[in-house]
Image: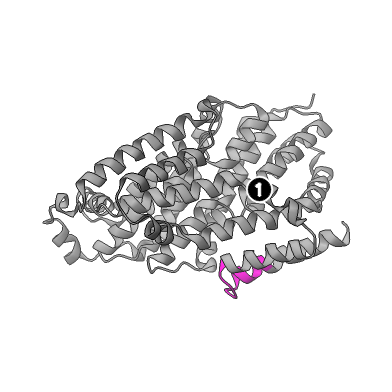
Amino acid sequence: MELKAWIAVVLFAVTILSIARGWMKASTATLLGASAMMLFRLVPGSAASQYIDSNTVGLLVGMMIVVGILSKTGLFQYIAVKAIKITKGNGILILLSISLITAVLSAFLDNVTTVLLVSPVVVSLADLIKMNPLPLLMSEVIASNIGGTATLIGDPPNMIVGSYAGFSFNDFLLHLSPVVTVVWLISMVFLCFHYRKDLSPDPAATNRLKEVDESKLIKDKKLMVRSGFVMFMVLLGFLFHHHLGLNASVVALFAAGVLLATSHLDDGEIVHQEVEWPTIVYFVSLFILVGGLQENGVILSLAEILTDLLSYSPMAMILGILWISGLSCVFINNVAFSAMFVHVVSEMAKSAGMPPDPLFWSLALGSCLGGNGSYLGAAANAVMADFASRSGFHISFGSFFVVGIKTVLISLVVASLFLFITYRNVVTY
C-alpha cells in the first residue's frame, strides 16, 4: 500500500481507539477522523458526499420524528404495561418476548426502524418495574441484527448482496431463515445466562402495575390514532418501497412531514429535541471514514491478500469470507463493508473457478451477524446506544463490546456449521 493508504489506516485506527477507550464521544471522534481524512486529502472534499449513504441518514431523521411524535401520545407506556401484565413481571420472559418481537419486526423492516420503534417501549417498561434496562436494550438490538439477517429487506447489507447477486426475497428466506432461527435461540440463551443477575424486577413495582388501567396512560387519543395510521402506512411503504421505486428514506421523511403538518405540535421543538443529531453526525462521519479506506485501496488490498491465502479450497473461501466479514464488521460499518466486498467476493469466485452463490451467502451472514460486535458495526447499535444515553442510561463502548463480541463468535460458529453442512460437497467449475 502507498503512504496515503497507511495514513488512512492510522486515522481509522486512532478513531476506533478513541471511542473504545472513552477519550471522546463516538460522534466527536468520527467527526474529527472524517475531517482529518479530508484535510489530508485522503478523501477529496468534493467526493466525500458520494460515500455518505443518504438513504440511511434520511431514514434515521424521518423515523426519529415519527417516533418522537408517537411518544407524545403515551402509546409506549401503554404497550409497556401490557407487556408486564402478559409476562407477569418475569424478567426472562420479558427479555425473550422483546427480543422475539424485535427479531420478527426486523425481518420485515429495516433494523434501524425497528430499534427506533422498540427502544422507547423498553425504556418505559424498565422504568415502570424498576429494572436495569441494559439487558433489555442489548437483547433488543442484538435480536434486530439477527432477525434482519433472515430477509432481503431486513438489513442493508442483505439489500446490497441481494441486488448484486440477483437473489430474491424468497431466496433469503429459504437459505438464511433456518440458520437465523438457530442463531437467535442460542444467542438469547447466552444473554439470559449473562444477565441472569439483572433480570429481577422490583416485585412491589410489578404488583402495583397489575392494578394500573393502561388505557388511562394514553395522553392524546386523537393524535395516537392519527399517528398509528401514519405508522401503519409507513410499514406498508417499507414492505413495498422497492416495487414502488422509492427509497425507504423517502417513505420515512414523507411520513414525518405529514405528522408534523397535522399534529399541531411545535414542529421546531420536535425536530430539535427528537432528532438525535449526534447520531446523524456519527453516521455521516463514519461513512466518510470508511470511504477513506476505500478511496486509498486499503480494503481492496486486504481482499487481494485474502484471496491468495484462501483460494486453495472452496470451503476455506466460504468459511474465510464468513469470519473475515464477521470480524471486520465489528469495527467497520457493515453497510460500507458489504458494498465494497461484494465486488471482492465476485472476483474471488472467478479466480477460484467456483460457484459464487455460497460466497455471497457467507458475506450476507458475516456482515449482518458481525454487526452485533460494537457500536461501529451496524447502524441500529449506535441508534440504540444514543437513545439509551438520552434516556439517562449510558452504555459504554466497552460494555457493548464485551457482550457483542461473544454474541458474534457464537453466531459465526453456528453459521460455520450451517455453511459446512450445506456446501461441503461444493466443487470448482
Q: Is residue 164 left or right of residue 214?
A: right
Reading the image, the residue beneath label 1 is 336
Q: Where is residue 86 in the image (x, y as percent from the top left)?
A: 21, 47
Q: Is residue 218 above or below residue 7?
A: above
The span picked out in magenta is: 15-26
The verdict on residue 152 being magenta is no
The verdict on residue 24 being magenta is yes
Image quadrant in which you'd find residue 4: bottom right
Q: Nearer the viewer, residue 276 or 198?
A: 276
Which amino acid type is marked by label 1? Ala
Which residue is at 62% across, 68% downward?
A: 29
Which residue is at 62% across, 44% downward?
A: 366
Q: Where is residue 184 in the image (x, y as percent from the top left)?
A: 46, 44
User: Dot 1, crowdedness within 10 Å: few (<14), some or many (≥20)?
Assistant: many
Q: In this view, does 39 lie above or below 237?
A: below
**From the image, which quarter does the N terminus lie in?**
bottom right
**From the image, which quarter does the C terminus lie in?**
top right
* Residue farthest along the right direction in this orientation: 2
Which residue is at 57% across, 60% downward?
A: 281
Q: Is residue 155 left or right of residue 314?
A: left
* Residue farthest along the bottom direction in this orientation: 23
Q: Is residue 146 left or right of residue 420?
A: left
**Does residue 352 appear in the picture of this structure?**
yes
**Does residue 186 appear in the picture of this structure?**
no
